[in-house]
Image (cartoon, helix red, strand yellow):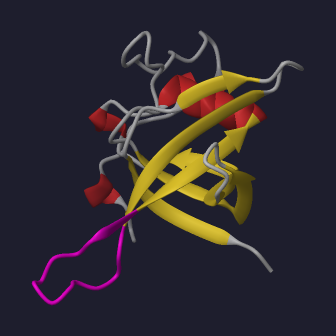
Amino acid sequence: MNKVILIGNLANDPEPFTTQSGISRSTFRIAVQRRFANAQGVREADFLTVVAWRQSADFCNRYLTKGSKVAVEGSIQVRSYDAQDGSKRYVTEIIADSVESVGSRGDGQAHPRDNGPTPPPAPPAGSAMNDFTEVEDDELPF
């Protein structure tokens, strides 16, 4: 089984690309902190390349920026190619099945990059949402 789940911060803005057949791709690197500190007491990070396709790529390209905290679920893929100098090179990438923003709402994440933060839409007049009464957390029995 080849399954990976990572939570980290984008080390760069997503790089959008569209194939000749019109399929969206997004490539970015995430910094994932290691579980334990090194001998100097510092928690190092691994920088991993993530490739997202189609709707996941569209989401990444539109809403994520450098520093965004994300959860990535996917698989590890290793590919190789011959470099111009004749040597064989290997590339390890995370192929994302899903990408989710895990930042808090107040930090400006999960908003279109070109328009900035946008307020949530108001419920339509006469909808069931208008019938709710706001309750303080202290009033809840649990």
Q: Quadrant of residue 18?
A: top right
Residue at 68%, 38% in the rendered image: 56
Q: Quadrant of residue 54?
A: top right
Give the main secondary structure, helix, strand or loop, of the magenta stretch. Answer: loop
Assess whether residue 75 is covered by the magenta stretch. no
Query: Is residue 131 visible in this depiction of the protein?
Result: no
Q: Quadrant of residue 36?
A: bottom left
Q: In the image, is residue 3 above or below residue 140?
A: below
Q: Quadrant of the C terminus?
A: bottom left
Tell whether 74 sits left or right of 23.
left
Residue at 26%, 59% in the rendered image: 138
Image spot of residue 122 (x, y percent): 50, 15
Residue lying at the far left in this picture: please name it.
40
Q: As rendered, which of 15 and 62 lies closer to the eye?
A: 15
Image spot of residue 92 (x, y percent): 62, 61
Assess whether residue 41 is covered by the magenta stretch. yes
Residue at 80%, 80% in the rendered image: 1
Query: Is residue 58 visible in this depiction of the protein?
Result: yes
Residue at 35%, 76% in the rendered image: 34
The segment highlighted magenta reads 33-46
Q: In the image, is residue 98 above or below residue 62?
A: below
Q: As rendered, which of 12 and 119 lies closer to the eye?
A: 12
Residue lying at the far bottom in this picture: please name it.
39
Image spot of residue 28 (x, y percent): 51, 41
Image spot of residue 103 (x, y percent): 38, 46
Q: As rendered, which of 27 and 128 lies closer to the eye?
A: 27
